Structures are given as C-alpha cells and as structure tokens.
Image (spheres, rainbow, N blue to C red):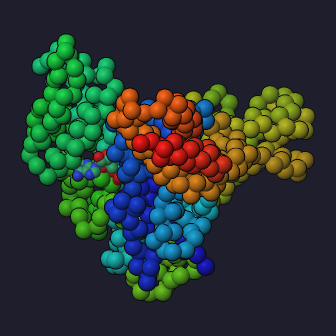
Amino acid sequence: MSKVIGIDLGTTNSCVSVVENNTPVIIPGASGSMTTPSVVAFTSKGERLIGESARRQAVTNTERTISSIKRHMGEKWSVRIDGTEYNPQMISAMILMQLKKDAEEFLGEKVEEAVITVPAYFNDIQRQATKDAGRIAGLTVKRIINEPTSAALSYGLNHGEPQKVMVYDLGGGTFDVSIIEIGEGVIEVLATAGDNHLGGDDFDERVCDWIVRKFREENHVDLSRDFMAMQRVRDAAEQAKKELSTNDTAHILQPYLIQNKGESLHLDMTLTRSEFESLISDLIARTEDPVRNALNDAGIAPSELGKVLLVGGSTRIPAVQSKVRALTGQEPSKNINPDECVAKGAAILGSTLQGNGLVAAGTGQNLLLLDVTPLSLSIETVGGVATRVVERNTTLPTRYSQIFSTAAPYQRSVDIHVLQGERPMARDNKTIGKFRLKGIKAAPAGVPRIEVTFDIDTNGILKVSAKDLDTGKEQSIVITADDRMSESEIAAAMQETQNYAANDQVRRDAIELLSEAQKLLSQSGERVKAAGKQLDRSLKKEIRSATASLRKLVGKCRLDKVERQELDEIRSAMRALEQCLSRMP
Ligand code: AMP
C-alpha cells in the first residue's frame, strides 16, 4: 500500500511530510530545504518553475510569476499566460505536483494519496477548490483537515497528557485560532475563529508603504510607479520584517533601485523594531476578537488552557507573541516548529486513515478526530433574512434538516439560496450555492412542506438536498456555486497536467539541447568573425543559412509544448551547421 502524504499548502510556503517508522518526517524539497515556496512561474520559453527556482526569478519576471495563490482560492480569479487561462486550483495543483514529486523521490515509490490542510476559516468553496487542486495534481485527497487541528495533532502526540490547547496560527495570508481538547486518542476541536485576510503579507505591505513614503520625502520620487523597483522594495520589506523578529533595527539597502533624471538612486534606510510595531499594531489587534470569540464559543476561560501553541511564520514577531501573552495570560509554547507541525499532523492523520495505530504516542490506538464547522450555514428566507440551519462550531460530520414552505399562493417552485456566515441578513453573508426546487404541488402559501437537509462531511464540505414532503419526491440537487470548477473543467485540467508531467523528460532534453544549440550559434558567430576575409564566400553563405535555420528552430521551440520531433529537427540543423564549420580553414 503506498503511503499517504500530509501536505501543508501554505500561502507563502508549503511543506510535505510522511510517517516513517512511526514518526512523521519532513520531506525536503528539490533545493534541500524543509519548505517549498508556494510560487509558480512561467518562463518566456514556456517552462514552469515551481518553488525556490520560481521565487528566485520573481523580480525579473513579475508578470509571469504567481505567489500567494492561496489568497484567491475559491475566488473567480484567473491569470492568462501564453493564451491559457489558469485559475487558483490549477496553479495550486502545480505546487502540489511538485510536492508529490519530491515525496516520490524521497520514498522511492509512487504517491497517490494525500491529506491536505486548509485554514480552519476556509469556507466550503475554498475547501472544495483545495480538493479539486489535489485531484488535478493526480492526488486522491483522503481528507481536508484544518491547519490548527493538524498542528494540535502533531503536538498532542508528543505531549500526550489530556488538556485544552489554543492554537494561534498567523501565517502569510490567514489568521486562525482554535481551541482544541486533546484526550487519549481523541482530538476534539471545541471552537474556531479567524480572519481569512490577515497575515504576514499585510505586515510587508505596511513596511512597503513606509519605505515608499519615506523615499518620496527624501528624494521626491514615487517608487510605486515603478513595477520592478516595487518588487525589490517588497522583498526588502519582508526581509526587514524578519530581521526585526530577532534584531532591534533592520537596515534596508537596495543599491541602484531607480533612475531619476539620469541619476541612480539607492534605497538606504533603517527601520527600528518599535517603528515597525507601530506600523502593524492595528493589524495585530485584529486577532483579539477571534481569540475572545473562540474562547467564548468553547466556553472556557484563558486560565483553563493547558498550552498556547504558536503556528505560522508570523508568530515569530515578538509583538505578536506579546499580544498572545496579553490575551491569554500564558507564555506561548515555542517548542514546536511553526513551519513543520501542520504538515506533520496531516501525515499522522494520513497514516491513521490507512488503519495504522497512533504513531509516536506508541499506543497503537486508533485516532478519533472531531473537527467543527467554522461558520454558520443558513438559507435565505422572506425579507432577505439568513435563517440558520447549522450553527458555527458544530462538530463534524453533521446532518441537519429543517422544514421550509412557500411564501406566495400556488407557488410551484422555490429558490434555495445557501449562505455561509454569521450576519443576520442574507446579503451580508457569502453565497455558496443557489438552486431551484421545481414541481411543488400547487397549494396556498405556507402549506407545502419542503425539507432542506445540510450534510457536512469530515472535510467540512457541504451537500444540500431538498425534498417535497407532500409528494414524497426527492429532488436531486447539486450546489453549483459560480466559482466552482465543473467536472469537465477538472477533467481537462487533469489531462493537461498529466500531459505536462509525461513530457517532463522531453523538456529536460530540450533544455539541454537548446543550451548546446545556443553555444554552437555563438561559437559559429565568433569563428566567422575571426576568419574575416579569409573565409570562402560560398562557405560563408552556407554558414549564414545554416545558422539562420538553427536560430529559427531554437526561437520557435516552446518548452511547454515541445515534442520529440522538434528536438530531432534542431539536432539535424546543429549537425548541418557543425559540418559547415568543420570545412572552415
Ligand atoms: P506561513 O504561511 O506559515 O509559511 O508564514 C509565512 C509568513 O511568515 C510570511 O509572511 C513570512 O514573511 C512570515 N515570516 C517567516 N519568518 C518570519 C520571521 N522570522 N519574522 C516575521 N515573519 C516571518
């Protein structure tokens, strides 16, 4: 049986883990590091770069480099590159494929199944999108699990005593807080809350704004108008932010940042930790309400917490740690690796889903994982009111039914509008699906009885069905949110991915061959130049024509579509040119 890998598909970095000899281990990426940047780039030659290599070239290839795609998960977002439209699921699938490949190389065997983590606060559409991304990458997603739950799972197994813990997870793009009860073989999420659009990227933006403002005051130049310069400023801002987690000051230095009136201007500034803290204090304060709400929903006081776990790169910021201390009255635990524990928890769950006993704890016990739904689910009723069907923080899996009726006399159909969120009015919540139940028996208003059932599985994914209780007929209804991919779109994306993967060897050969061809072209130019007038005119003409043919073939070759036959043509053009060169004196 092949192993189930655990994947933390992060906004900034991703991490993959697998259980080996009863212990979760992190699988190193291609560059040898424990995490892989969640960055995808398309080179002008049509090659796809993933991870560290994509991140490194981001500054020089901004428009064709995609980072923080997780922020768009489940949104109607797309990017068009070389005539192909890519949505967040497809971009995420490329990252997942890379992690799958790294895992296969590490294990020396095929990997087909995974557990993927998502922020607890992800809604149904975002979870579905993540699952679809896994499918596109050729993975069967055994389970979608909440990141804080996963972190608690990896922590809980090493520190087995039963207790309630808080997981405060502040990453690059999202904030999650969960209260989790760890028992003997049972991990139960009591409550979860958060903010889908809060994280380290926002801190970077504040530092960027500060740099741009200060640069304008000092040099009267607006950096924000220069795309390339801004890319460097963004990198420098993140670097400075990270340095300030350990140092009191950060020196921000970017030589030759921008040209102004024929003069090069350099970026040379110092940001102090206290200045940085005042730039981001309101953002950190936004974590207060979710923390209080989660504690309230779980019905516990901060003093009842056995441990406060910090997860996510942004919890390395001292001001964030102080905020956690102030909110909980506890010293947060630092002995878990915030970058790795989420993936490890997913690997542990993956292993137990295969029927293995609880790893690391050495108990051989089965694991019971009780997660909750992060947001309330409702349907829209008369007057635009959101009527609750499932309350937030309900333990999963769950199934709820409620009877609704018609609002107008002799109404033959009803529109069912499914919503996610806590607000009382439908328009203030997120629409996650709409459908029409037709064929209701003609009757006065309020007489028909329509049973609407919400089914939420262990992944937090929702199915809604409706039944006309009078006719007894159940209509099969599928939620089709506008931004979900259809089955045929997923199938097409899977096909494209598989073709791309199958062509990997051809592409690798092409990269090598193109570099040899470029070398030959420049050698030929140099030799013709060196020979000067000594070169026979007709041979010179032949060399020129052979060079032109080869250059044309090389220029035409696109790595994303390259085929063997094209490489053969390049090879024979190279041979023709080599033959001409061999006849030179
Ligand atoms: P994650 O999504 O958990 O990988 O977190 C990534 C975020 O953590 C990014 O915004 C990083 O800039 C941020 N981060 C990583 N290391 C540090 C650090 N030492 N200090 C502050 N922020 C950090």
Residue 421 percent location from the top left of the image: 53, 41
**Residue at (21, 28) in percent of width and height:** 257
**Residue at (81, 39) in percent of width and height:** 437
Q: Is residue 522 left or right of residue 426?
A: left
The residue closer to the viewer here, 372 or 277, is: 277
Number of marks: 0
The residue closer to the viewer here, 193 or 101, is: 101
Residue 62 percent location from the top left of the image: 40, 34
Residue 55 percent location from the top left of the image: 37, 45
**Residue at (44, 58) in percent of width and height:** 8
Q: Is residue 138 left or right of residue 358?
A: right
Residue 182 percent location from the top left of the image: 40, 72
Q: Using the image, determine if residue 461 lies above or below residue 47.
A: below
Q: Residue furthest bottom?
A: 363
Residue 338 appears in view: yes
Residue 373 appears in view: no
